[in-house]
């Protein structure tokens, strides 16, 4: 697998010889970009953004000064520097926040180390890049949950372990003067039951969002002829049979052609438990009928109360597939972000910083 980091650096170093990668590693208050935003800067060009405006101009100026110093020769490998920027009048910005940027010079030697380490990484493999903020120390990578290094400070080892095991969000973090950056992305599994008109609109609306979509229906001919390679097609004569094999914490959205199938899927998800969201496309009448039958089937009222019906945002009405899809996608994204915030909030002091 070629990671985005490796690809960007390979392309820029190949053309320009030496570049500076700028990463936004800490943010407090109102800021134009989130932690993890990055730029790759060469003498004559750049790619990416850390928020635009005066902040980005200052980053370009600082990076190109480092490039000019590197051109003078006799520069040690893995040169890094950190700069803090209050986003106030001094930068002509009214955000009122504060950001910390990491500047890192990279050329052929640094690229060779990265390539050697990532050569045999398989598609979908979880990899963390670990950057000490201090110059001269090699960029390191973690590929296994039990991987540990004596040279990593204890907070770094703890953060790496939690991220690799899934108990901490797969998002960049600064801890103990080390910046930990996930390579690639880990998407939340979402099981969509039903490939009708609304199901197709939902798949389009979810495209590009942080969901790994598993599209379930009873036959191949129920799907459109062309399906994105990023969508997993699952065919099952009885879609509820899929449920016991779904991972914990998944999202489930039910909209098949059959009320019977819908009910069976909803009951299977509720009985299994360990899910983030369960929603079924339904009128208020269908919801009332489902709730009554689910309780009669032996599920507790507390368990059944986790069922969302109707689906989507309450303030956005409309029965057209596209409107339903946009409303649902927005609701699911809000719920996903809330889940991620809850998972990370107890461990964070300043935003993006683990103590």
Image (cartoon, rainbow, N blue to C red):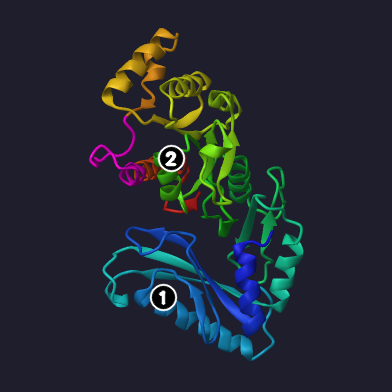
Callout 2: SS? helix
Say which residue label 2 marks. Answer: 199
Query: From what the image shows, is residue 290 above or below residue 343?
Result: above
- Sequence-wise, which precedes: disc 1 or disc 2? 1
For the point 36% across and 31% down, the residue is 281
Q: Can you give x and y, in whole percent of width and height, for residue 203 in the image? A: 46, 46
Query: From what the image shows, is residue 262 above or below residue 327?
Result: above
350 left or right, relative to 137:
left
129 left or right, relative to 270:
right
Query: From what the image shows, is residue 182 above or below residue 82?
Result: above
**The N terminus lies in quadrant:** bottom right
Callout 1: SS? helix
Say which residue label 1 marks. Answer: 56
> Label 2 neighbourhood size at 10 Å, few (<14), some (14-19), many (20+)?
many
Q: Can you give x and y, in whole percent of width and height, for residue 43 in the image? A: 54, 86
Find the magenta span and give its range: 310-327
Whether residue 268 is in magenta: the answer is no
For the point 61% across and 78% down, the residue is 12
Q: Can you give x and y, in whole percent of width and height, for residue 286 in the image? A: 32, 22
For the point 69% across and 87% down, the residue is 74
Q: Can you give x and y, in whole percent of width and height, for residue 87 in the image? A: 33, 69
For the point 57% across and 77% down, the residue is 20
Query: From what the image shows, is residue 89 above or below residue 172?
Result: below
140 left or right, relative to 304:
right
């Amino acid at each position: 697998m070629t990671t985005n980091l490796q690809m960007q650096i390979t392309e820029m170093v190949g053309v320009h010889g030496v570049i500076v990668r700028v990463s936004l590693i800490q943010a407090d208050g109102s800021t134009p970009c989130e932690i993890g935003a990055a730029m790759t800067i060469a003498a004559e060009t750049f790619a990416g953004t850390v928020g635009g405006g005066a902040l980005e101009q200052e980053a370009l100026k600082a990076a190109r000064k480092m490039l000019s110093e590197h051109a003078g020769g006799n520069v040690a490998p893995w040169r890094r520097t950190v700069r803090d920027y209050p986003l106030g009048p001094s930068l002509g910005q009214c955000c009122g926040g504060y950001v910390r940027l990491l500047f890192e010079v990279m050329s052929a030697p640094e690229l060779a180390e990265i390539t050697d380490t990532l050569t045999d990484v398989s598609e979908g493999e979880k990899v963390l890049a670990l950057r000490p903020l201090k110059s001269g120390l090699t960029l390191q990578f973690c590929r296994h949950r039990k991987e540990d290094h004596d040279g990593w400070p204890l907070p770094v080892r703890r953060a790496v372990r939690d991220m690799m095991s899934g108990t901490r969000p797969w998002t960049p973090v600064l801890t103990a003067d080390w910046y930990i950056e996930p390579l690639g992305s880990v998407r939340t599994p979402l099981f969509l039951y039903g490939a009708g008109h609304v199901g197709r609109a939902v798949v389009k609306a979810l495209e590009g969002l942080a969901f790994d979509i598993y599209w379930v229906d009873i036959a191949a001919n129920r799907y459109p002829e062309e399906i994105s390679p990023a969508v997993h097609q699952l065919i099952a004569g009885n879609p509820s049979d899929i449920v016991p094999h779904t991972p914990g914490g998944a999202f489930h959205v039910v909209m098949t052609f059959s009320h019977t199938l819908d009910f069976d899927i909803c009951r299977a998800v509720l009985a299994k438990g360990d899910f983030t969201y369960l929603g079924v496309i339904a009128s208020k009448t269908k919801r009332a009928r489902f709730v009554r039958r689910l309780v009669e089937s032996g599920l507790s009222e507390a368990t059944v109360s986790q069922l969302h019906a109707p689906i989507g945002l309450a303030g956005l009405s409309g029965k057209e597939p596209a409107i339903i899809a946009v409303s649902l996608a927005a609701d699911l994204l809000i719920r996903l972000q809330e889940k991620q915030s809850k998972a990370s909030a107890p461990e964070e002091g300043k935003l993006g910083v683990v103590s």
